[in-house]
Structure formats: C-alpha cells, structure tokens
Image (cartoon, helix red, strand yellow):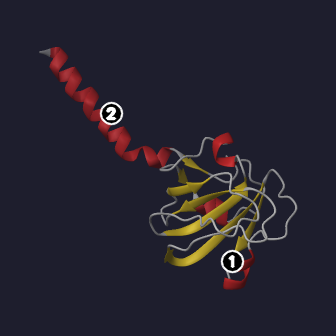
C-alpha cells in the first residue's frame, strides 16, 4: 500500500516537472557564449542578412526580429559561409533548425513548418556544439539585450 502511494506521488512529481521544465532550461545568449548579436529588424536588413561576409566570429550571431509571427523562407544567395538557422517562436521555443546550410545555393529554401518571430543565424555546427535542439527554449530577453 505504501508503495502505491509512493509511486503515485513520484509520477505526479515527474509530470509536474515535465510541465514546468521549460522554465528551468532556457538558454540565455551568455549561456551559449554569444557575445555579439547583430539585429536584422528592417526589411532591408533582413533581405541582406549575412550576405557577402567571408566569416562570422565564433561568438557572433545575427538575430532576425519580426513584429508578428511569420513563415518566410531563407536562402543562401550571396552568402559565402555555412550557417545554422534557428527558428524561434514568441515564447523562445526553437520550432525548427536548418543546420549546415549550403553556401551560395539559391535553390534550397530553408524554412520552418510553423510560424516564428525570430531566426538566429550562427556559424554552421553551432546547434550541435551547444546541444540546442527543436523544443529547446531561449531566454529571448537576453538575446534582445545582448550587446
């Protein structure tokens, strides 16, 4: 009988922790080692992105910021470096990741299956190196105040 109560309490606690786990596992920009974040907020900045760059420092990224949820496609036109693209919703949840994009390829479109409010572009391999996966959470306040 005691074992049944113990088991019920244990399972309840596990379920509660799973429900609230996202609040305890948000990555901040600092947690990820990002010291410089450039922002692409205007349509012109977003159209240009990281085009024509020969490199991106290891601790640098570009954050595309949208006023409302969108579902745009990205391509690598005139982008010389391979990137990881992390699509992030308004809650800071990673909803899609495009890893190791192909430089200069204008035919492959990188997109999210759902709407998002932010896209973080980093050097290729960033997501894997930092253990960032779909359903991970970012503390977006830290990204918007990073510099």
Looking at the rendered structure, the secondary structure element under dot 1 is helix
Q: What distance separates the C-alpha of mark 2 from that of mark 1?
A: 42 Å
The tag on residue 14 is 2
Direction front: furthest residue? 107
Task: Answer above or below: position of 4 versus 57.
Answer: above
Quarter of the image with the N terminus is: top left
| Horizontal side of residue 123 vs 71, given as left or right | right
Give the residue drawn at x 22%, y 21%.
Answer: 6
Looking at the rendered structure, the secondary structure element under dot 2 is helix
Give the residue drawn at x 57%, y 55%.
Answer: 97
Which numbered disc, 2 or 1, marks the residue closer to the eye?
1
Give the residue drawn at x 64%, y 47%.
Answer: 127
Task: Answer above or below: position of 66 versus 26.
Answer: below
Location of residue 118 by image quarter: bottom right
Direction right: furthest residue? 54
Residue 46 position in % (x across, y down)? 68, 77
Task: Answer above or below: position of 126 versus 75.
Answer: above
Give the residue drawn at x 78%, y 66%.
Answer: 79
Residue 68 position in % (x across, y down)? 50, 78
Crowding at dot 2, Cα within 10 Å, few <14 / some 14-19 / many 20+, comes out as few
Quarter of the image with the C terminus is: bottom right
| Horizontal side of residue 62 vs 135, given as left or right | right
Q: Nearer the viewer, residue 127 or 92?
A: 127
Residue 137 position in % (x across, y down)? 52, 52
Q: Nearer the viewer, residue 85 or 93?
A: 85
Residue 19 position in % (x across, y down)? 35, 45
Location of residue 67 by image quarter: bottom right
Q: Which residue is mark 1?
A: 46
Q: Nearer the viewer, residue 129 or 144?
A: 129
Q: Nearer the viewer, residue 65 or 145?
A: 65
| Horizontal side of residue 12 vs 19, given as left or right | left
């Amino acid at each position: 009988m005691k074992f049944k109560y113990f088991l019920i309490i244990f399972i309840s606690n596990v379920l509660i922790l799973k429900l609230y786990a996202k609040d305890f596992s948000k990555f901040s920009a600092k947690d990820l080692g990002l010291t410089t974040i450039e922002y692409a907020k205007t349509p012109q900045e977003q159209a240009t992105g990281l085009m024509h760059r020969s490199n991106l420092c290891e601790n640098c990224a570009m954050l595309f910021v949208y006023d409302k949820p969108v579902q745009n496609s990205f391509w690598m036109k005139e982008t010389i470096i391979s990137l990881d693209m992390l699509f992030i919703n308004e809650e800071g949840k990673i909803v899609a990741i495009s890893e190791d994009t192909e430089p200069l390829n204008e035919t492959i479109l990188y997109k999210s299956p759902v709407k998002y409010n932010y896209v973080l572009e980093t050097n290729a391999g960033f997501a894997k190196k930092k253990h960032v996966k779909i359903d991970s959470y970012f503390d977006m306040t830290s990204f918007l105040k990073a510099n």
